Image (spheres, helix red, strand yellow):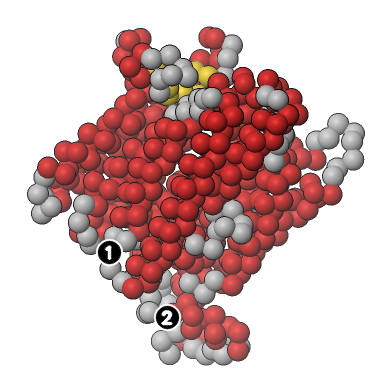
Amino acid sequence: MTGMLDHLIIVPILLPLVSAAVMLLLDERRRGLKGGIGIATTVTLLIVSITLLRVADMAPAASGGSVAKVYQLGNWPAPFGIVLVLDRLSALMLVLTSVLGIASLLYSLARWHRAGPRFHTLFQLQLMGLNGAFLTGDLFNLFVFFEVLLTASYGLVLHGDGTARVRAGLAYIAVNLAASLLFLIGASLAYGVTGTLNMADLASRIPALTPGDAALFAAAAAILGTAFLMKAGAWPLNFWLPTTYAVASAPAAAIFAVMSKLGVYVILRLWTLVFGPEAGPLAGFGGQWLLVGGMLTIVFGTIGILASQTLSRLAGCSVLVSSGTVIAAIGTGGGAVIGSALFYLVSSTLGLAALFLLVELVERIRDPGADVLAVTMEAYGEGDDEGLADEIGIAIPATIATLGGSFITCALLLAGLPPFSGFIGKFGMMAAMLRTDGAMVQTSTWMLIGLLTMSGLATLIAMTRAGISSFWARLDD
């Protein structure tokens, strides 16, 4: 049993890869068989991920360390070989990816997997890239897995038809190619300075760098950070994200909700590992930039939420608020704050994915342009009382009632209101930031707390307005 568990860490990468290869050999018209293979693969991935999470959770008590397992591919030792690293954080992200994968894939079987070729193959490659990026312990292989998942996401963004989807997809491809170029430049510079790309080895070599090499490594870290922040949707490099997510198919947008958190995950992983207290002069490098960038991202996303005239656009801007919140929490540098931010990350990602899937179901029962018409009527005060008497006593169909209840749940979760988990995550972050052991609370801390509160209020207002126009207001009179 122990020997099997030793090799279980590589299953989240190999299983979707093999599944995608098998699907390529099948005729495209056999979508039912491909869907069955995809469901079996994602369910197996969830079981494996939960098992790995249990292994990671038990490891610290047994070994006294934070790393549960290091898997050496080909039995080549680091830093010469490729290593996969499993701990609680990476295992948690694997479980989150598997859950969203199952939900998105099941949703796609009703319609979207027939909208274009190779959907199931692209979906499995997307899962492979995400799982590999969460598990790798090497910067170069992180780049490889990034490119695998990005290549698959290009196909998923363009899956279907429509001019808007093609236009947004091309912008998405251009932005991510630029981010990949920055990734290569930053990784090359880091390797030239330190002679390694293994993350743990980087952390051990940083304190011994000369002042000149330390400056070069700081430049490399800044370039890498820019690339990761672009992928995470941080301001001002996030202009592409709301539009792309809004026009993508519902199952693609749902799985993209966790893809945007990959950039946040890498920043957290590298920043805490490489620029920890042991990094000497580089300890805490870039923390203030992360804090300011995260807060500006929250502001940008909040304004976008209030200005959104469609549900899909509102959901896309909500991704920015979620990413900005976690980035700002990382920038504070507090362990308790980051722990609460990770809880919020899981909660908000699940809520966003559910909202993306829900948006399409809501739009199916509405006329085209109904959102824009509702906002226009609200702005000019038209139609407030028209037909109100006729609607009293009308029974709400079960489908609309179910969708409305689900929408309310998503709204409360994303706004961070009790009793849902979004409130617990935000409250935990605020409580940790105010716990200063008698020291004065910094101005930036009060600003972040204010932004967290205002973003939640803005989300509640925008979601309430969208819910009224979608489930209550009658625009056909």
Placement of 341 over or under 317, stated as above or below: above
Residue holding disc 2: 369
* Displayed quadrant of residue 344: top right
Residue 152 image point, x, y percent: 32, 49
The C terminus appears in which quarter of the rendering?
A: bottom left
Residue 84 image point, x, y percent: 42, 24
Q: Secondary structure at mark 2?
A: loop
Residue 54 image point, x, y percent: 45, 22
Residue holding disc 1: 160
- Of circles 2 and 1, the one toward us is 1
Chain-order first, disc 2 or disc 1: 1
* In the displayed structure image, the side of residue 169 where residue 201 appears, left or right: right
Depth order, front residue of 8/350:
8
State the residue at coordinates (42%, 22%).
83
* In the displayed structure image, the side of residue 116 where residue 431 appears, left or right: right
State the residue at coordinates (69%, 35%).
215
Q: Amino acid at mark 1?
A: Gly
Q: Is disc 2 surrounded by few (<14), some (14 to 19) or many (20+) residues within 10 Å? A: few
Placement of 9 over or under 24, stated as above or below: above
How many numbered marks have been drawn onto this rendered protein structure? 2
Depth order, front residue of 194/284:
194
State the residue at coordinates (35%, 33%).
46
